[in-house]
Every structure is written in structure tokens, then in C-alpha cells.
Image (spheres, grey):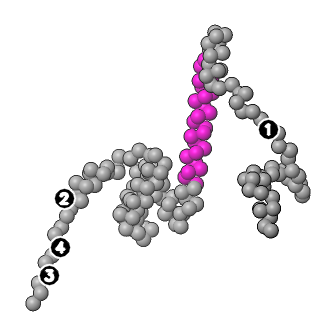
Amino acid sequence: MALKEHLGNDPTLFRVPVEWAKDHSFAVKITHFDASSLDTPEDLLKEAILEKQPIGPIIDGLVAERMESERSEIVTNIIAIIIKSSNKGLAAMQLAFAAGLLITADKTGPAIAKEWGISKQAFFAGVERMRQELGLKQTRTMRDAAARQNMSKRNYRKPKEIKVS
């Protein structure tokens, strides 16, 4: 009989908090905490208004907490994008381009693509994918979808006819 079958299918069964002290580990006792007993932001604001307290510090704290949460999520997403990439250096350059960091460095997309040995279309496809994944706005050097479509029509060249004799 397999260990999992013997112990059951409880998904929390193997989640044992462990802490290390010098050269040995020990289990940490789990105590349940009812998070619903905490004051909600609305409760804090209502209480401050009823007690005629300033609400500015509460709002500042909520905004700061939200900003820290967003910042942490963005950093985590950036690291995840780079880690899962097979070419981490190229991924970092595409992220830098998507964020607009290379505008003042006189580095163009085609030049970066050539440096990394890929087509400019592949480079810009990666930039666009990362820009969308991170929710970044287009930089001033990026074309929108309509402009790309218009440009593809302007630059269309008919294939040369091959004469067969």
C-alpha cells in the first residue's frame, strides 16, 4: 500500500512548518487564527470618522500597503519571466526595451535583435508579449497595431515573376 493511500488524501497533511536552529530542525506548532476578527479598512475609517480622528494616516497606510503589494507582484512577475526564458540575457533586453529603458541608450530594436542573432520580428514579438504580461504602456517608440498594419501595407512588395521558358 502506498504511503499516500495509507494516510489519506488530505492536501494539508505534508505541510508541516519547520524552523532551523544551527544544525537541527524542529516542527513549529500550528495555531489557528481567525483572520475575520481583524478590522477591515472600512471599519478603521468608520471608527476614525465617529471619533473625529483624521483619516489621512489610514488612507496613507492603505495606499502604501497596496503599492508594496503591487511592487512585489511586479518584481515577482519580472523574475518569473526571466527564469522561465531559455535565453535570459535576451529576455532581460526585451524587458528593458518594453519598459522604455533603452530609449536614451541609443539601442534600437533591430540593432538588439542583430546583436542576439534573431529577427527583429521575433525580438518585437517578445517585447510585446512581455509588455502585455506586465501590463506596461507602449513607449513612444512603439507602434500600435493599426500603425503596424498600415506600415505592412505600405511596404508590401509584389514578388517578382519568374519566367519559365
Which tag, 2 or 1, sits closer to the chain's start? 1
Please provide percent x and percent y for residue 90.
49, 63
Three-letter residue code for mark 2 = Arg
Q: Which mark is residue 41?
A: none
**Residue at which label 4 appears:** 159
Residue range corresponding to the magenta coloring: 55-79
Which tag, 4 or 2, sits closer to the chain's start? 2
Q: Residue at x 80, y 51 (%)?
A: 16
Q: Which mark is residue 154?
A: 2
Question: Of discs 2 and 1, which sits in the foreground?
Answer: 1
Q: Residue at x 44, y 46 (%)?
A: 136
Closer to the camera in the image, 26 or 119: 26
| Left/right of residue 84 with respect to residue 119 in the rendered view | right
Picture quadrant where residue 29 is located: top right
Judging from the image, what secondary structure is the residue with disc 2 in? Answer: helix
**Residue at which label 1 appears:** 32
Three-letter residue code for mark 4 = Pro
Q: Residue at x 87, y 55 (%)?
A: 25
**Residue at which label 3 appears:** 162
**Disc 2: CA contacts within 10 A as few (<14), some (14-19) or many (>=20):** few
- Marks 3/2 in contact by CB < 8 Å: the verdict is no
Three-letter residue code for mark 3 = Ile
Please provide percent x and percent y for residue 137.
41, 44
